[in-house]
Amino acid sequence: MPLDTRAATPIGLAFRAALTAAWASEAVVLAGCPSPEPAIDASELDASVLDDDASVDAALDAPLPPCEAHAIDVVAGRVTDLSGSAVPSARPQLCARLHPDARLVCLSPPFTDERGDFRITVPPDVRCMDEAVLRVLVTRGPYAVTYCPLDLAPSSDGTLSLAAPIELAEIASAPTLPAAGDPASRREVDLGPVVIEISPTEAGGVAEYMRLGALAIDPARSCVPEARALAGLVAITPEQSRLELPFRIASTGLTAGTSVDLFVIGGLDTRLADGSTVPEGELATFGRGVVGADGTIEPAVPLPQLGWLGWSPAR
């Protein structure tokens, strides 16, 4: 189903707000678009929406339509690092699967304040949703992009206040990163918990290649409930998708000979080798490996993305 760009932005019914400088300068992300942050210009809107001010007033004053799913008007929460310190200027982006047509809409993300707090106001034409996920990042910052599925159980006024903060993993660049050299040439990069073969081009360019890093995370701290039962979890930066990278997991803590399932957490445009897509914030298996005598795993399947990698003994 094609995306309704007017309904997918805060511009639709909230027309006047779209004409302010704040909204005019913000990019609105629509899932399924080729670019992750296409800008929506007011001049591209249906002329009838722009010209008929009376109809806008009527729409704004009209009662909200009934919602047979989850009616969410506001999402509020806090973003911290793994130590519990506030992360200002983080960008929590709400992506919702709407009811009843299952259309996927991602709103323009606000910035967290100096306390790490944020508040997302949901446009009326997006408030009725079946499910939603928060994609949280710090633009060009040293944090792994984090995806948190939301439990849509708001208070009676439609406000969803997150009980626990969203934790971002701060990741330093690999200390032994090979020189960029030929940007199209793959080289082995030791990221600590995982070793990959990658070229600067596959990493997103030389600047992104210089940010390559990884950090082992306690699976119990994941905001993806299904990931908390994993035996191991690693966050890798920067986020990149549609890859097929040779890799090995450096240390698992599992007994030699153990067969393990390999997992990714769906990120921006995550695709597996068979062409299937993994929704944002969803845990999905992409292959198997066996723990070697040295405790490492060197799977035959490639790594499909830079983002979140997990493993657990095969069932």
Image: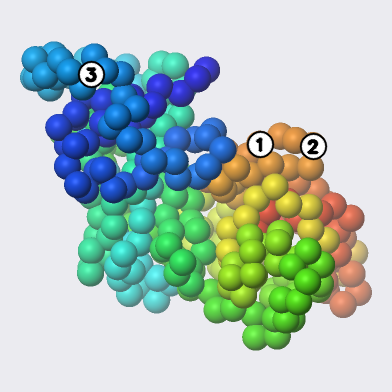
CA separation in Å, label 3 and label 1: 35 Å
Element carrying mark 1: strand
Front-lying residue, 127 or 26:
26
Badge number at residue 277 = 1
Amino acid on which the number 3 mark rests in the picture? Val
Q: Residues within 10 Å of mark 2 (few under 14, many from 20)?
A: few
The residue labelled by disc 3 is 49
Helix, strand or loop for disc 2: loop
The residue sitting at the front extreme is 43
Residue in the image at 82% along x and 67% along y: 185
Could you say where residue 134 lies in the image, as x and y percent from the top left?
Answer: 41, 47
Residue 198 found in image quarter? bottom right
Element under disc 3: helix
- State the CA–CA distance, disc 1 to disc 2: 9 Å
Return the disc, 3 or 2, that comes first in the chain's sequence. 3
User: Which numbered mark, 3 or 2, is in the foreground of this view?
Assistant: 3
In this rendering, would 303 be left or right of 108? right
Q: CA distance from mark 3 to mark 2?
A: 43 Å
Taking 232 as reference, is 119 above or below it? above
Residue bearing mark 2: 274
